Image (cartoon, rainbow, N blue to C red):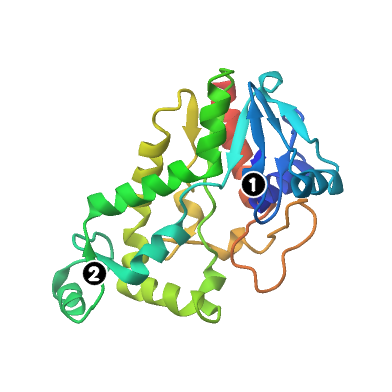
């Protein structure tokens, strides 16, 4: 499993009774994982900070993925936060979803000073962001050397707690909920991810399950209450709205197992 702090949800799930094959982690919280190198089928941590992070948590500093049954890339691609960032300065010219149409939506648009952006341009922008992330780069490089099955697990949507967060996130996400724009960007984001990774053979995109979603674009509280840090054991701080835990992680591992066993 290759990724950032969101790998913690899978480690927590594994520590909660995972009965599948042994799991190997190559992960660093925050930034830094993108500085890893790929040589053939081997991903290597040779950046001093990345090496130190791997050793701090007892993780390997290199992994030959050709020896693995599968590779799971976690986050490191376009996310709902990227979509929300675009909507700070732009509004979709052809929105869909709750609040995206009708007379109320039209009246709101007339008062909205943001620049218009088409759905097509929005998807293209998010696809470009996905291709620029470490997951796409690592998957592309590793695919040249190995045919091992690959999975992409995008960063989970922000938790419902973001609605209670201080500026800048709280006001932004409350506006996205009220206008319906939050729910309206989920489909374009999914399409952008599908397009960005379509050229990588044997890669399975695991989009967030609908029954884990609240308000159409946030992660329901039931899946964030047990949010953990990258080690899979330490709880996240009380104000966290980015992470999930073992309950969500178990869903991911079950979906991976279903594909591999199918």
The correct choice, above or below, for 179 with respect to 190 in the image is below
> Toward which corner of the image does residue 116 lie, by quadrant?
bottom left
Residue 249: assigned label: 1
Element type where label 2 sits in the image:
strand
Q: Is residue 37 left or right of residue 164?
A: right
Q: Percent from the top left, x then y, of residue 208?
A: 49, 48
Q: Pinpoint residue 18: horizontal percent, then vertical percent.
A: 74, 37
Indicate which disc residue 56 carries. Answer: none
Vertical side of 251 occupied by 143: above or below: above
Residue 29, horizontal then vertical, whole percent = 70, 54
Q: Quadrant of residue 178?
A: bottom left
Select label 1 or label 2 by which is in front.
Answer: 2
Q: Which residue is mark 2?
A: 115
Disc on the earlier residue, 1 or 2: 2
Q: Position of residue 219 (x, y in %)?
A: 52, 60
Pick the quarter of the image with the C terminus.
top right
Quarter of the image with the N terminus in it: top right
**Is 110 above or below relative to 236?**
below
Q: Which residue: 63% across, 21% down?
A: 40
Residue 173 lies, with reference to residue 57, above or below; the image says below
Q: Is residue 190 visible?
A: no
**Mark 1 and 2 residues: CB-CB less than 8 Å, in contact?**
no
Which SS class for mark 1?
helix
Left or right: 158 in relation to 177: right
Q: Residue at x 63, y 26 (%)?
A: 70
CA separation, marks 1 and 2? Answer: 38 Å
- Mark 1 Cα within 10 Å, few/some/many (few <14, many 20+)? many
* Rendered residue at 56%/17% (across/down): 147
């Amino acid at each position: 499993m290759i990724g950032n702090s969101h790998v913690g949800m899978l480690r927590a799930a594994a520590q909660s009774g995972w009965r599948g094959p042994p799991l190997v982690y190559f992960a660093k919280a925050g930034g830094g994982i993108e500085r890893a190198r790929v040589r053939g089928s081997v991903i290597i941590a040779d950046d001093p900070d990345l090496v130190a992070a791997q050793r701090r948590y007892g993780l390997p500093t290199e992994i030959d993925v050709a020896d693995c049954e599968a590779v799971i890339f976690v986050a490191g691609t376009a996310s709902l936060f990227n979509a929300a960032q675009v909507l700070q300065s732009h509004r979709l010219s052809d929105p869909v979803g709750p609040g995206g149409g009708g007379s109320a939506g039209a009246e709101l648009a007339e008062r909205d000073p943001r620049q218009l952006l088409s759905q097509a341009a929005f998807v293209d922008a998010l696809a470009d962001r996905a291709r620029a992330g470490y997951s796409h780069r690592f998957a592309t490089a590793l695919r040249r050397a190995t045919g091992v099955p690959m999975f992409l697990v995008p960063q989970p949507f922000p938790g419902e707690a973001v609605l209670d967060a201080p500026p800048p996130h709280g006001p932004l996400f409350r506006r996205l909920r009220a206008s319906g724009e939050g729910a309206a960007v989920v489909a374009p984001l999914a399409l952008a991810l599908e397009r960005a990774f379509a050229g990588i053979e044997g890669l399975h995109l695991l989009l967030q399950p609908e029954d884990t979603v609240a308000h159409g674009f946030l992660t329901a509280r039931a899946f964030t209450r047990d949010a953990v840090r990258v080690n899979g054991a330490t709880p996240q701080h009380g104000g966290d709205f980015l992470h999930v835990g073992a309950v969500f992680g178990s869903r991911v591992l079950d979906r991976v197992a279903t594909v591999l066993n199918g």
